């Protein structure tokens, strides 16, 4: 809960505004008095606070990240934080703008501390430091500082508070005693105030890792992608660089979804007239599989797997080839179907349904064992019978035909091509009913794991399993179920030689596995290499992590994040129970499809996308450039239905652009005016900003380079050296000694005897050691292009007559506004724009 002192730190926060809101309309009919506010504040301070959570969050309401390149200014957060190079440069420019306003003594005293405080926007705990965890409350203008650190800041740098905020309460309080000011700046949660947040081992030990609940369950969040689908059985992309997604419903419709979330009104494919399906709860028949040819972008070919019924009696599964329309890239040619393979089904269940292309370019077909219970067909069942096509992984070459009239060929390296008792299409056997398989695209850098095929094989009575498909492998069914024996006689046969699953779980966890994908996306780096899958009946999501040294796989439980973990705009932490399928988009991001009622005609199917709230990829790294999609028909916009943790209709509250009224620079001398008046009149002003390479000087270096602050009265009565010459001569020497590089600003001074002398003061901060206590004979600067040579008769013609009182009145009339929060050009700065 936001406290009264926190409200003072917000741009629009009135001291007791939140009290009126929290109490409700009947609690305070009148504005509470100051005494009431103080009493309630004290009561709140006595309330015990919950222990800190390790959940980091940035000011843009996104997880933190590792910048792709090192940071030039806030270097302490270049390994992990909330700033990329652009934001880092913006903070650096604001910092130098403030430094320009400080006298030498003020600069020497608190430059390092000012930099630390401004860089807290880059901290991975920025949301805690600035009270930005709740998007509906304003963000603090100053980070939460621990009392000891705040006391030091107040003692050294209270004069910079007016440059950091325009909050009048903060500015007024900074001029008072330290306890009053630090009570406003402090955080109620002492673990998160700066610099305590850096010292807490509980907070920093798992920084950037997937948040775990007390049971060790990985907390992930979701976004809703599509809804109102009738039992969506699959979602896939066409690998044609359009980044479209194709979602198939069990009843036989395939829909096109565009990158903006909209769905095309006309379906890509309508097979509802051919597909056999019913409204029975949990019926496994229907449109079950689809795969795009690896060269779909060029040839427009794709393949489908669905249930059919012949003469109202015989049931089969059919694998067909089809093509996209020559006139519309978003519609299939309904007359292009060519049947590749048909397999008779002795029962209504265990129909398999997965088709996919391996990296070898061949089509893999995954069939069920034929149905019923215990694979009762024949002496050994269909799965152990290599002469049957049921209970198998088949592999065919669909880029040609054989001499027997089949529309495919047998790959020459199929394992049983020379076995007279085996079908040549068989690639692996002994499977029960593999539901959802996927090809691992491999690690993005090392390519480790590329090409592996993972499958979830649904069990019988006791176990569900995950397998990696190998050529010629026997996966044990019906001899085994998971790691255990199912048929004792077959199980103890020495010739079984089966391949064990990489993972199996009992029916206490779930009763129908849904195979998933190895995450290889860009947006959630923590998930890389995790095989994520689920269970249809229990609605549980699970993950497997590989030990590369031993080749074993360890379970990592996955659960939906709690309210605090998923408190980002647009995120949800719940999903429908029945997990039908998993999916991967063209960029490698991971999704799953679920429904609240598993019937082919029920319109409760929803597509969810995974999101890790503890870490994200750097902004811009995962941007895609999809090819344009020519849409001929209408588009149906996406309207989310699921309740988000935060209301999606509300936009996060950000502090408004701030205008800071800074005092003008010190008075000028006649020589300084001469340098500016001899320049040619230029009407346009430009600004070139470079990344400031700032490294904090140690104490010895600061003492070594320290110069005495000049006094206003002496400067008024004494001619100073030409500042332009000092800038050209001293800066070169100074840059050789210190790594401080200020942003380059090509300033052109207007012709006026009241021009501010920023260059003089900035060069005073950069005086090299050799010049301490010595007079400088400054050479005359070479004339610039377009500049007029100074007239000797005008050498002493300009005199400063203003008294200090007159100068103060002049400053009040010439204050310059600039926006600390915005990276702007110098032209906008002069015009007072932001």
Image: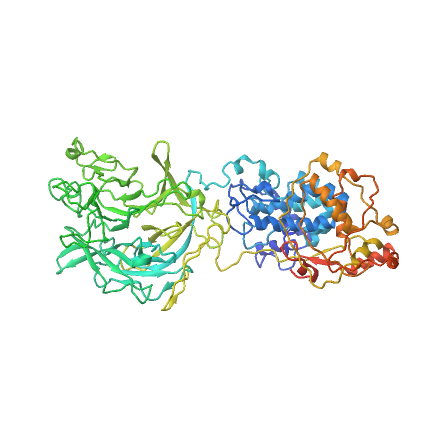
Up/down of 833 relative to 371, above or below: below
Q: Is residue 151 visible?
A: no
Looking at the image, which is closer to me, 739 or 317? 739
Lateral position of residue 342 relative to residue 761, left or right: left
The image shows a total of numbered marks equal to 0
Looking at the image, which is closer to me, 792 or 808? 792
Q: Is residue 64 visible?
A: yes
Q: Quadrant of residue 709?
A: top right
Looking at the image, which is closer to me, 794 or 271? 794
- Estimate the x, y position of residue 223 in percent, counting from the top left: 42, 53
- Estimate the x, y position of residue 275 in percent, counting from the top left: 22, 59
- Estimate the x, y position of residue 510 in percent, counting from the top left: 30, 43
Q: Quadrant of residue 315?
A: bottom left
Up/down of 75 relative to 18, above or below: above
Colouring used for the render: rainbow
Up/down of 615 relative to 242, above or below: above
Lateral position of residue 55 relative to residue 632, left or right: right
- The quadrant of the rendering that contains the C terminus is bottom right
- Estimate the x, y position of residue 735 in percent, counting from the top left: 69, 42
Looking at the image, which is closer to me, 383 or 242? 242
């Amino acid at each position: 809960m936001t406290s009264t002192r926190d409200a003072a730190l917000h741009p629009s926060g009135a001291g007791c505004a939140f009290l009126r809101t929290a109490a409700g309309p009947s609690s305070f009919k009148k504005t509470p008095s100051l005494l009431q506010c103080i009493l309630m504040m004290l009561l709140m301070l006595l309330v015990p606070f919950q222990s800190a959570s390790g959940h980091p969050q940035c000011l843009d309401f996104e997880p933190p990240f590792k910048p792709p390149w090192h940071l030039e200014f806030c270097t302490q957060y270049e390994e992990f934080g909330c700033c990329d190079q652009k934001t880092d440069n913006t903070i650096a420019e604001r910092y130098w703008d403030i430094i320009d306003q400080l006298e030498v003594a003020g600069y020497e005293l608190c430059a390092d501390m000012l930099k630390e405080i401004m860089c807290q926007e880059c901290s991975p705990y920025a949301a805690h430091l600035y009270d930005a965890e709740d998007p509906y409350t304003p963000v603090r203008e100053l980070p939460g500082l621990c009392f000891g650190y705040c006391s030091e800041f107040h003692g050294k740098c209270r004069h910079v508070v007016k440059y950091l905020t325009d909050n009048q309460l903060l500015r007024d309080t900074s001029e008072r005693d330290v306890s009053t000011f630090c009570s406003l700046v402090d955080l109620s949660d002492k673990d998160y105030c700066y610099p305590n947040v850096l010292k807490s081992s509980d907070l920093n030990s798992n920084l950037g890792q997937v948040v775990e609940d007390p049971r060790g369950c990985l907390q992930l969040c979701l976004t809703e992608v599509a809804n109102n689908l009738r039992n969506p059985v699959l979602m896939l992309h066409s690998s044609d660089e359009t980044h479209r997604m194709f979602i198939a419903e069990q009843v036989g419709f395939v829909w096109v979804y565009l990158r903006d979330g909209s769905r095309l009104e006309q379906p890509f494919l309508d097979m509802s007239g051919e597909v056999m399906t019913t409204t029975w709860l949990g019926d496994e028949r229907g449109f079950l599989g689809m795969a795009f040819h690896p060269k779909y972008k060029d040839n427009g070919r794709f393949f489908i797997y669905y249930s059919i019924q012949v003469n109202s009696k015989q049931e089969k599964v059919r694998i067909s080839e089809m093509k996209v329309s020559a006139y519309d890239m978003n519609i299939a040619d309904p007359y292009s179907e060519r049947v590749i393979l048909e397999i008779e089904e002795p029962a209504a269940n265990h129909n398999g349904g997965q088709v996919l292309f391996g990296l070898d370019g061949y089509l893999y077909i995954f069939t069920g064992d034929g149905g019923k219970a215990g694979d009762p067909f024949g002496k050994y069942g269909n799965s152990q019978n290599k002469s049957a096509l049921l209970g198998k992984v088949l592999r065919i070459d669909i880029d040609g035909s054989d001499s027997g009239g089949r529309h495919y060929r047998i790959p020459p390296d199929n394992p049983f091509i020379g076995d007279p008792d085996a079908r040549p299409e068989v690639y692996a056997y002994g499977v029960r009913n593999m539901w959802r398989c996927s090809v691992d695209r491999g690690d993005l850098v090392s390519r480790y794991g590329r090409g592996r095929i993972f499958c979830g094989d649904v069990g019988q009575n006791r176990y569900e399993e995950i397998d990696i498909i190998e050529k010629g492998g026997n996966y044990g069914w019906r001899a085994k179920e998971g790691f255990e024996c199912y048929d004792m006689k077959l199980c103890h046969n020495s010739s079984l030689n089966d391949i064990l699953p990489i993972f199996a779980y009992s029916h206490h966890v779930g009763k129908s596995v849904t195979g998933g994908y190895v995450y290889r996306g860009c947006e959630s780096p923590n998930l890389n290499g995790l095989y994520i899958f689920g269970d249809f009946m229990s609605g549980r999501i699970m993950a497997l992590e590989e030990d590369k040294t031993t080749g074993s796989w360890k379970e990592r439980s996955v659960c939906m994040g709690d309210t605090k973990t998923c408190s980002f705009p647009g995120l949800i932490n719940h999903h429908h129970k029945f997990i039908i399928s998993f999916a991967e988009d063209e960029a490698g991001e991971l999704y799953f499809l679920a429904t609240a009622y598993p019937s082919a005609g029920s319109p409760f199917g929803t597509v969810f996308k995974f999101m890790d709230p503890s870490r994200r990829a750097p902004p811009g790294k995962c941007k895609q450039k999809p090819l344009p999609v020519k849409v001929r028909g209408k588009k149906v916009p996406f309207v989310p239905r699921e309740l988000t943790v935060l209301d999606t209709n509300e936009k996060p509250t950000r502090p408004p652009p701030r205008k800071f009224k800074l005092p003008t620079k010190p008075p000028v001398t006649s020589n300084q005016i001469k340098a500016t008046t001899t320049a040619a009149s230029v009407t346009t002003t430009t600004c070139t900003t470079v990344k400031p390479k700032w490294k904090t000087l140690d104490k010895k270096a600061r003492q070594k380079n320290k110069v005495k602050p000049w006094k206003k009265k002496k400067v008024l009565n004494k001619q100073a050296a030409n500042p332009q010459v000092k800038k050209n001569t001293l800066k070169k020497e100074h840059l050789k000694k210190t790594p401080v590089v200020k942003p380059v600003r090509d300033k052109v001074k207007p012709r006026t005897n009241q021009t501010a002398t920023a260059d003089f003061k900035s060069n005073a901060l950069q005086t090299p050691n050799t010049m301490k206590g010595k007079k400088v004979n400054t050479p005359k600067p070479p004339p610039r292009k377009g500049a007029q040579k100074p007239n000797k008769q005008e050498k002493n013609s300009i005199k400063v007559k203003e008294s200090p009182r007159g100068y103060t009145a002049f400053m009040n009339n010439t204050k310059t506004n600039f926006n600390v929060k915005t990276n702007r050009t110098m032209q906008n700065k002069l015009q007072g724009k932001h």
